[in-house]
Amino acid sequence: MTSLHKLTQRTAFRLAGFVAVVITLTNVLIFAILYFVISEQLGQHLKAHTDEVRATLADVQADESDGFRELSAAVARHAFVAQSDEDIYLLTDADGKYVAGNVSSLDRFEGWRTIPWNDLKLIGQWSSSRASDAVIGTWTPVKGGYLFVGDGNGDIKDAQRLLLTGLLWGIALSVICALAGGYLLGLKAQRRVEEMEHVLDAVASGDFHRRIPRNAAADDIDHVAALINVTLDRLQRLIGNLKQVSVDIAHDLRTPISRMRQKLETVRSDTSNIDTYKAAVDQSICEIDNIADTFDALLRISEIEAGAQKAKFVDVELNGLLANIIDALEAVAEEHQHRLRAPRGAGDPVTVRGDRRLLNQLFVNLIENSIVHCPRGSEIEVEVINDAQHPVVRVHDTGPGIPAEEREKVFRRLYRLEKSRTTRGSGLGLSLVAAIAELHSAKITLADNKPGLVVEVTFDQARRAG
Amino acid sequence: MRILLIEDDTETARLITDSLTLDGHQVDVAFDGVDGLKKAVVGAFDVLVIDRMLPHLDGLSVVRSLRQADVTSGILVLTAVGGIEDRIEGLASGADDYLVKPFALGELLARVTALGRRPPSPKQDFLFRIDDLEVNLVKHEVRRGGDVIHLQPREFRMLEILIKNRGRVVTRSMILDQMWGLETDTKTSIVQTNVSRLRLKIDRPGDTPLIRTVRGLGYIIDQPA
């Protein structure tokens, strides 16, 4: 079992690690996109700003007659205040010689270019701490020379640094969260597994009533717990069944066996009369037959309760089945001066899924019960209600009935009503009936026939047992 | 009849052999499945009585092997496990009949005899005469000493079963099965009551009784002794 612990722990950690990696990768991807988009955006912004400055300066030249000198003065002004903005200006004459600006010289080029700060030949006082590490700028031809306007990439760098810091913090936090969360989930799962282990250990050591507590979260572990509980229910039923059979056997078979033994011992010590011997032997044979019958019935009940026959169910027509049983029992009923009446309107076939032998046994037992327990001259009627979903078979009699408080108990094994204890019978007939009904997903109810008893067997064809 | 008994419990084997021999049969015994299978294939037996649980080769495998080898003798399987599934499996393997231990020796004899029955000649197929009882199965006509006896369909079927097995015991469980297809145990005396009714009509006061009760076992119809 400890290996299971380790396994869950490993699984939890692996899960946490996996989640952390996924979160990191996601963060990096998001950052990369943001980085690209923001850099691009800020680059555009920077160029727009530069263009604006160029346009302003160009206007200065255009408005004045002495344009170039005005321009150089404007550039010099701009250059002077530009140091804090990290803007770079350079105005050269047509030969490329310095006229005004804050760098002494710069190679001319077409379009936009990014020039590393360190390559700039700066003029004037510059703060040693700079946000920018490069200048993005472009040359513009003006009347009498060339004008360079560039903007430091400090804003972009700042944004990028911010993003990077954010990313690092984000990754750090999410990895911590993933690991902690994964570990906690793992611990929770482990606790559930431990819970299951405790219950299963308890069950293994004989406490069959224990069940794994369910939790509200219908997760997979809870699903497994539910399945285990169902299995345990079934196991408990089967074990209970087995115990019941053992108890029944002990109770119902030991008694007649010991009775027989005493009888044989008694007759053994009395050697006077061969007829006494014969009588004792006959009684013993009869006793043995009863024991064998009881044994058979007990085994059959537990076999039926185990439910293996369901796989071999076939369509069984109830009217025909009952007509045959009534044909068999009619003479016996008449001997008891009962009137046994067959189902009326037996024309329509009423079909259920089932085992013919067992259904025979069920209805023979029910009708025989009425025949045996009713006083002479009773009415026994069998009725079939043809309902497509729930066919019903009713056996009515006008006998003494069963008191309401006893009705549930009669299906118990070996239970016999006090007054019928003297009559022959194993007390297993109705248990067998109940077991067979249960196997067929049929419901049995006992009710008052006023006077007498109605036994109602309701099949459930919607479920099509089997 | 020549009967082969395959049974590993020597005491049971001895009791069954004695009982069958006493009934006038020739009995050979094998104590395990392999030996039994060999004997069964070589010897021409009329009936095989095979225990379900045998050493080396279980009873049902023996039955299956024999049926595959086209051995057509009647086979009765004995078993200590009388479960529902078990019985179906037994018959599905090719056995003709199935008997759950403990059983009455008389029941075994009756069933073995029924299995070993040779097909009756065509003439006997529908016309039976025992003493002054005449039964015509085609015309559904029964006469006793020349008088027509009116039987209910149920009574006629019962008589048919008895008379087709005349001279042999038909057990109560055999009648339950053949009359109504019931293999259930019943707590009322279904067979006894129905046979009594038949007997009232067949064996009228003054007639020689033809239907005899075999105590604790069943019924037999035969020429009066």
Image (tube, coloured by chain):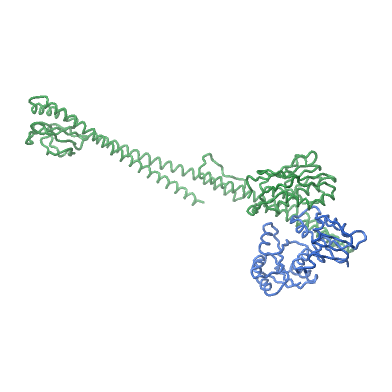
> Which quadrant holds residue A143?
top left
What residue sits 71% from the left and 74% below the top? B44
Task: Pinpoint residue B177: horizontal percent, then vertical percent.
Answer: 75, 58
In this rendering, the count of numbered labels is: 0
Q: Nearer the viewer, residue A267 or B151?
A: B151
Residue situated furthest bottom in the rendering: B42
Left or right: A462, with A319 as reference point: left
Q: Nearer the viewer, residue A287 or B221?
A: B221
Residue situated furthest front in the rendering: B139
Quick check: A51 above or below A33?
above
Query: Can residue B191 be seen in this snapshot?
Result: yes
Task: Pinpoint residue A174: horizontal percent, then vertical percent.
Answer: 38, 40
Residue situated furthest top in the rendering: A64
Query: Can residue A207 be seen in this snapshot?
Result: no
> Which quadrant holds residue A104?
top left
Chain drawn blue, letter? B
Say which colour chain A has. green
Q: Nearer the viewer, residue A310 or B30?
A: A310
Task: Pinpoint residue B50: horizontal percent, then vertical percent.
Answer: 70, 67
Quick check: B3 above or below A214?
below
What residue sits 43% from the left and 43% below the top? A182
Left or right: B126, with A434 as reference point: right
Task: Pinpoint residue A64: horizontal percent, then vertical percent.
Answer: 10, 24
Q: Nearer the viewer, residue A426 or A324?
A: A324
